[in-house]
Amino acid sequence: MRIHFAMRHAIAALLLTFAFVRDASAAGVEPAKDLRIDPALCLAAAQAQDDDKTISLCGALIDHEKTEKPVRIKALIARAEANVRKGMGYRAIRDYDDVQRLDPANADILNARGELWREKGDLPRAVADFGAAMKLNPAHAAARANHSAMAKELERQGVMKAVAGKPSFNCAAARLKVEKAICANPELADLDRDVYGSYIRATREDQTRAQAGKLRREQDEFIARRNASFGRPDYDLKKAMKQRLRQLNGIDGY
């Protein structure tokens, strides 16, 4: 499994800390006696991607009052990555929150937290984190790409929200019973807009004149049949619209 960029930095820093403790011991310097603040234990678990041990051992390192700030930050990142692998995104976000408070200039952490917010469906928070990471480090390629993608997604959702429950035609001008029924039902309105949108996309594809003509005739026939059949006991408008959408999209099912 791929180790996150921020975690690689955390492991490297913990390695340096462990090397210092080891060298100090070899030189006759008395090392710390409390094993709970020995970063080597957290490091070993993180390197082995033993998530349960990482959470436990790095957690002890994080919670100990004598743990120095740089080591606490690395342990928080290691625990966050373990939580991500275990599918506990909100716990990872809380760890990244703590890292951000301790190291507010860390663009990698803001980008990593933004990715988690995106996975949780909180796009505004994701965009905010990606934007903050870019502000700290304008050359941060991942944050820039993430921010661009999320901004476009938010814009798309805004457009979708604006047209939700609205058909492809102007309801103020609706005269036919079937048109009024579509306007009165948000699900049917969305289906009508999807059918029309798929038809427009299909006509814009690379087609011969004959193919384009056939497509237009089929759409005209569908509309005429829909208008004439609506209200009959054996006619299911929703079913007919879904069938037409499947035909246009060339897929099985809707």
Image: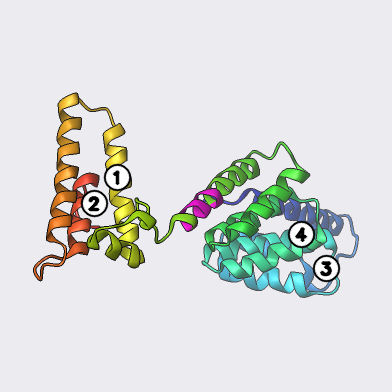
Q: Secondary structure at mark 1?
A: helix
Q: Considering the numbered disc 4 on the image, is that residue within a helix, a strand or a loop?
A: helix
User: Magenta region: which residues?
Assistant: 154-161
Q: Earlier in the sequence, mark 4 or mark 3?
A: 3
Which badge, 2 or 4, is on the more N-terminal residue? 4
Instruction: Where is residue 251? Give x, y as percent.
Output: 21, 49
Residue that mark 1 sits on:
198
Q: Nearer the viewer, mark 2 or mark 4?
A: 2
Q: How far is the residue under mark 4 from the one under mark 3?
A: 17 Å
Left or right of 222 in this view: 64: right
In this figure, which residue is indicated by the disc labeled 4?
100
User: Spatial distance from mark 2 to mark 4, Cα to Cα?
Assistant: 48 Å
Task: Compare marks 3 and 1 and give the one earlier in the sequence.
Answer: 3
Of callouts 2 and 1, the N-terminal one: 1
The residue positioned 62% from the left and 70% from the top of the image is 91
Corner quadrant of residue 179: bottom left
Circle 2 SS class: helix
Q: Amino acid at mark 3?
A: Thr
Q: Which residue corresponds to the image point at 80% horizontal and 74% vertical from the top-left? A: 64
How far is disc 1 from disc 4 in space, using C-alphas?
45 Å
Check the image and name the residue furthest to the right: 29
Label 3: element kind: loop
Considering only order in the chain, which callout, 3 or 2, is on the residue closer to the N terminus?
Answer: 3
Question: Which mark is drawn over residue 245?
Answer: 2
Q: Which residue is mark 3?
A: 67
State yes or no: discs 2 and 1 in contact (Cβ < 8 Å).
yes
